[in-house]
Image (spheres, grey):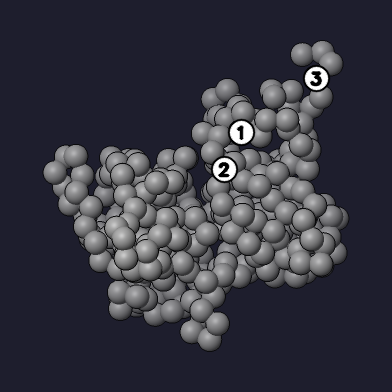
Amino acid sequence: MSGSKALRFAKLEGLGNDYLFTEDSPKNPQRAARLLCDRHYGVGADGLVLIMAPDNKNEADFQIRIFNPDGSEAEMCGNAIRCLGKYLYDRGNTKKQEINVQTMRGIIPCILMVRDGRVYRVKADMGEPILERAKIPMVCAAGEEEKKVLKEKIYLEDHNTFEFMALSMGNPHVVIWVEDVDNFPVGKYGPMIENYSLFPNRTNVHFIQMVDEDHIKQRVWERGVGETLASGTGACAAVVAGVLSGKIKRKAKVELRGGILEIYWSEKDNHVYMTGPCKDVFEGQTLLI
């Protein structure tokens, strides 16, 4: 590998959802994501995040692109956004405690919460939920493009049927309510639903158990990744689905396997706000790519 240029990166995690952040520019980011995110032969992560200058500096401070371990590009990731805030502030890339980040989903405003000179929590404005069937996106018949997917059934190859709600937080989500999420076979049904024919771009899948009107438990099957310990956009989607189904309040605690996120769906501006922790893991460089 003599002559190869090392790619510098930092690994951060939000509730166990870990990402590799780099300001370098790999020639083939899809290949880089597949190599670097591999937990046996690479560094190991739930995704690769490229940090770049924004298209318009009057609208955003930074821009990111997010790649899944299978090389596919993700429109948005809530946990990655929180970790990005910590990466930028702690390393001196910004002195602001309020930043705007350009994503494929649009501009995401973030408030960085600082303690002893370092970011420990981030509140992100995740924007408005997208409920129209065609925009999620889902396959739809003529005239159904704007129909909301509040209570539909999915028929799986093992003859099981699930009632679900679907929406987008900049990326597609399916929400299914179960009685015992801890013992639910996520590894069996997650990939079946992710790749179901209704979803042309595949979908993230969330299995939710109601604890109280302001508390839910959630397990995550992430598109292009598999089961993960947390999903920021998924937690937002779960709360929106819970509110629309009349199960929970607009402000709720979402208990994921990696920890707790605070989600608030504002009635005032229809935006969903996510607050949660972010931590450094380590920094390094690699010649893998």
Please provide percent x and percent y for residue 266: 51, 81
Q: Are marks 2 and 1 in contact (CB under 8 Å)?
A: yes
Q: Pointer 3: what residue?
A: 4
* Residue 208 visible at all: no
| Disc 1 secondary structure class | helix
- Residues at marks 2 and 3 touching, judged by CB atoms closer than 8 Å: no
Displayed quadrant of residue 274? bottom right
Front residue of 122 and 55: 55
Is residue 95 visible in the rendered image? The answer is: yes
Label 1 vs label 3: CA separation? 18 Å
Q: Residue at x 65, y 56 (%)?
A: 103
Q: Quadrant of the C terminus?
A: top right
Quick one: which residue is furthest to the left in this view? Answer: 159
Q: Amino acid at mark 3?
A: Ser
- Sequence-earlier tag: 2 or 3: 3
Element type at marker 3?
loop
Residue appearing at x 77%, y 56% in the figure: 55
**Residue beneath disc 2:** 73
Is tag 1's residue or tag 3's residue first in the polypeptide sequence? 3
Left/right of residue 232 with respect to residue 81 in the rendered view = left
Task: Point out the residue furthest to the front here.
Answer: 142
Q: Which residue is mark 1?
A: 30
